Image (cartoon, rainbow, N blue to C red):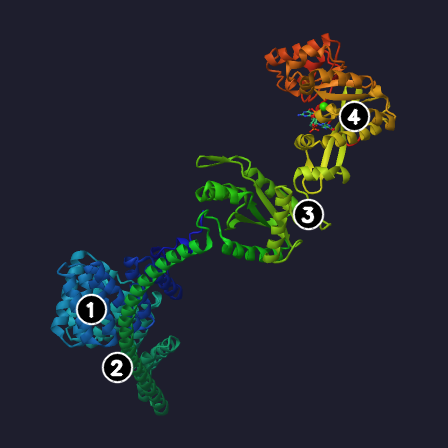
Amino acid sequence: MSDPNSSSLRTPKRLLEEAKRHMQEDTERAALLYEQAVARARLYRDQETLADALNGMAKLAHKKGESNAAIFHLQEAREIRRLLGDVRGEAGLLSNIGSLYTDLGSFNTALDFLLQAETLAGQQGDVLSAGIATNLARVYDNLDEVQSAQDQYQKALKIVQEAGHRMGEAILSTNYGEFQLRRGNLPRAEELLGSALDITARKGMVAAEALRHLGVLYRQRENTDAALLAFHEAINLARSSGAIDSLIEVLISEAETHLGQGHLTLARDVLFEAEELARGSNRQRTLSRILQLTSQAMEQDGEVQAALHTAREAHQLEAQVLKAEAEQRTRQLATQHELERARTELDQQRHRYETERQAKEKMERESFERMKELERKALYDALTGLPNRLLLADRFRVALEHASKSGTRLALGVLDLNKFKGINDNLGHHVGDELLIEVARRLEPILRTEDTVARTGGDEFVFLIRSVADSSAVLAVARRIMQAFEPMFHLYQHHLHVSPSVGFAVFPEDALTYQDLFEKADKAMYEAKTRGSGFELHGMQSSDRLAPVTLESALHQALKNEELDIVYQRFTDPRGKPRGAEALLRWHHPMFGHISPLEFLPIAESTGLSVPIGAWVLNRACQDAAKWHGLILSVNVSAKQFSHPDFAATVQQALDKSGLNPALLELEIKEELLSRHGERAQSRLSALRDLGVRLIIDDFGEGFTSFSALKHHPVHGVKLDRNLIQDLNPEQPSSRDEALLTAVVRMAQALGLDVIAKGVETEHQWEVLTSLGVSAVQGFLFSRPEKAF
Ligand code: C2E
Ligand code: CA
């Protein structure tokens, strides 16, 4: 649930309602809420609420005696109602304005507004009309137009009576009664005041007022007892309803009555209470009246000195009040005039501002579009749509700042297409262009969003790679770049292989500025071009030499740099008795990290490197196995090794050097290799067998081509291809997979060969293999390749 007070929920309407609720007990809060309501209503253009809120603000201002501010608000509210076409709303506001001018003593202005209000309200005879009539009556009363005042009172009274608005009738009867009383029409006054008392059941503030006027009426009739009774009742009511003005007025009336009767002590007692109240509530004008009466009582009491003193105070007070009132009035009139001027000016300014704002917005929009277009042209390469040199330099500046601050690296790469000029010259520029577009299309997706590839001219592309952890991150990008060029380019009717040369340099190791980094990367790129190695990374190594970054060149150094290693994976008989372990080659490149033999062995093969590497494995593994106390060592033999004329000699050397028993060395030769070498394979196998080592056909069962020749091969056993067992499924016990496996195993066994199963991962596979009577099992189910055996 969200907080109902959260400002987002406070619509202008809500604020207004809240303000209205606080109007009675917390005017400060109400004032704030009204202000907010007004501001928000303006913002949301909620005219209805704006008008209401302005009306509320006017009421508050009036309460505080700030009549001019009140009028100002009312006038704006009235304007809104007029624009909204809310005739009755407008009439109500005009009536309020008129009432305020009446309070200010501007009776003619008040009359103007009230008559307008009357016209707008029409002859509807409702509460609105009653209010207007009452206000009109007050003005006419002040203007001494007794008949008109009386007419309006009558009219108002008739309306509220017909509407059954009892409270309204009581108030109106009281006011009208007081009017009749002042005008000397005592019977009518008595009738009206009596009716007010009936309606209110002699309770509350209105009853107090009616009783006070009745008291005055009785006094005029010289019925002092009745007057005093009425006053006492009024005093009690006013006291209990907290109507302080009413209370003071009755006290004064009572005192006057006592004075008229010559009851000086009583008069002075009552006056004393009235004085306290007036002083306490800062009612200056009333206080002055009270002091005058007090002075009168004192004089009658023979206290001439005190009477004089009090009279002086009363006069001073009155003078002050009059002066203050006069000043305030001038001020009010002046400010009101100013306010009105300011308002018109504000309206005009608002209009001007709005027109200007719209024009400015339009201009800004247009120039923004223009800027964007210009920027696009200035910062992006027209052909490929990639960032151009300018934008790259800018992004580099930002990236460099960030890298320096955060202490991270960034890499700059320069890519150049090999033989681009030839393509351009021989196949035409349209083909060259198409190639560049396609290259851009392939390069873009290989970078992260925070990185940039730009075309900086001709066939030159530049990479900006941020937050580079180490050189392997750069190499990863370099690899992805090389991969992007693997598929052929289809350009018009031409199908081409295009290769790039890329050079990288890294901040801060290689250089600290864009220019220097660029030069270093460019140099690395040329290095790559001359070597034909694809990509080169400048620096990031202890030595100054350019690092070899292709697997091939790295592999060359792997042996020298002792980056190669061997792990051993055990194999056992089906019951778990150890039989031996297979040597598996590992390569930990300082930058590439761990590289799988499946990845680098094909390269080693294609470059002939597998021969020295294989020799190294043999030597090292034999040395290790010499300490194994009778367990078998299995070593994989590659095709190049196998076909190398010196291979048997190499094996012999390894055995000699390590002192390993030849019967404990098992050479694994792939099945496909044997089928490829045909007759020659057989003689090679024989030569090896003569060394006394065991020969195993690896990945057996993959291709059956050599099956017929199998019986002629002098081998000791076969290692089943992983494919044969990997799909064995306990859900389908006699599947085709199992049938095939069974056939292969039976065949090998029929030829008197040991059968070894590798890649055993599940209990089920193990069960099946055991039931088939294989001689050894190897796989993750039993053990992983490990550093030492
Ligand atoms: P391989 O001869 O089939 O060697 C067994 C491979 O299977 C090893 O992968 C081993 O880690 C993995 N392996 C062992 N048990 C499981 C198992 O339960 N499930 C599965 N899925 N795999 C298992 P590795 O070490 O990556 O070797 C891959 C291949 O590289 C070898 O396959 C082998 O042909 C070749 N190789 C490894 N070392 C040498 C070597 O020194 N010389 C030559 N010429 N080839 C090698
Ligand atoms: Ca093997």
Q: Which residue is at the front of the view, 401 or 665?
A: 665
Label disc, if present, on residue 260 of the rendered structure? 2
Q: Which residue, given by chain and number where applicable, does mark 1 sit on? A: 135
Q: Amino acid at mark 3?
A: Leu
Q: Which residue has dot 4 on it?
A: 646
The mark that comes first in sequence, 1 or 3, is 1
User: Quarter of the image holding residue 166?
Assistant: bottom left
Mark number, residue 546: 3
- Assign a secondary structure to mark 3: loop
Whole-Å distance between the Cαs marked 1 and 3?
Answer: 101 Å
Cα–Cα gap, marks 3 and 2: 123 Å
| Sequence-wise first label, 4 or 3 | 3
Q: Nearer the N terminus, badge 1 or badge 2?
A: 1
- Dividing the image into four quarters, tell me where ligand 1 lies: top right
Q: Residues within 10 Å of mark 2 (few under 14, many from 20)?
A: few
Q: In the image, residue 124 lies at what x, y percent?
A: 14, 58
Residue farthest front in this picture: 426
